[in-house]
Amino acid sequence: MRVKILGCSGGIGGNLRTTSMLVDDNILVDAGTGVGDLSIEQLLAIDHIFITHSHLDHIASIPFLVDTVMGIRTQPVIVHATAETLTVLQEHVFNWKVWPDFNTIPDEKNPLLQYSEVKLGEPVTIGNCQFTPLPANHVVPAVGYRIDSGKGSLVFTGDTTTCDALWEQVNKIENLKYLIIETAFSNGELELAKLSKHLCPSLLIDELGKLTRPVRVYITHLKPGEGETIMYEIEQSSLAVKPQALQNSQVFKL
């Protein structure tokens, strides 16, 4: 199994793209602006989208993706998310006011977009891969995901702040290879990080201190213009793990 990073920034501009990952050729985990770099042929191959939460930087490309493949696909695109996130999509995006309701196009019996509810700890199997929602702590209902090929697992936290329940689950994963965790702000913005329920380096270091398994750690969701400061502050810690900044187009094999 192959996981390619399409976007990993907390904003846009230049080469920056917001959060999205492509699993093999047909599954997205989050659908930020990075999805826009895919060709129409690649967009047509997307059958499933797993969403961590409803914030715009994680869902921005879903409306455009569905609109682009309309009339070309014969099967629906399935969006997997918590009940709360699906409700936001239905009421505030695909509502005919912001965007057409593709859950009723071309008709309710044959929609181009379908919703599938996920629940914490309950894996969803697609082909040879399992996607298991993990706890997260954000300002809106949110989850992370464990992506498991059977041979190895990658954990993506999504947006989160301090979350003991997350580490309880992560530390049970025997085949854990990679951890992708957010750090949106520098230490100088600690209060903003707390208010918005994101991490900054000091909070991240506390969280990684709860990790008991050996794993390669990558930092995502760095705010534009703050990446060097954030990574420098992380590097000053005495953590056993040495986190690296996640990069667009980076590929992980599981």
Image: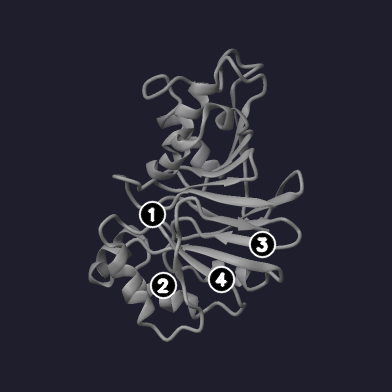
What is the basis of the colouring in this image? one colour
The residue pinned by badge 3 equals 153
Amino acid type, mark 2: Leu
Residue 37 drawn at (x, y percent) = 45, 37
The crowd level at tag 1 (other Cα within 10 Å; few <14, some 14-19, many 20+) is: some
The amino acid at mark 4 is Arg
What residue is pinned by disc 4?
Answer: 216
- For marks 3 and 2, give the CA distance: 21 Å
Q: CA distance from mark 1 to mark 2?
A: 17 Å
What residue is at 35 percent from the left and 59 percent from the top?
222
Looking at marks 1 and 2 on the same chain, the residue that comes earlier in the sequence is marked by: 1
Q: Give the residue pinned by disc 1.
A: 139
Residue 188 x, y percent position in the rendering: 23, 71
> How far apart are labels 1 and 3 at the CA level?
27 Å
Q: Residue at x 49, y 50 (%)?
A: 249
Mark 4, Cα crowd under 10 Å, few <14 / some 14-19 / many 20+, is: some
Furthest-bottom residue in this view: 238
Q: Earlier in the sequence, mark 2 or mark 4?
A: 2
Q: Quadrant of residue 98?
A: top left
Counting residues from the start of the chain, the first of labels 1 and 3 encountered is 1
Report, in whole angstroms, how far the alpha carbon at label 4 lies from the one at label 1: 27 Å
Q: Position of residue 250 (x, y in %)?
A: 51, 55
Which callout, 4 or 1, points at the residue further toward the start of the chain?
Answer: 1
Q: Residues within 10 Å of mark 3 (few under 14, many from 20)?
A: many
Residue on which disc 2 sits: 204
What's the mark number on residue 42? Answer: none
Query: From what the image shows, is residue 9 above or below residue 94?
Result: below
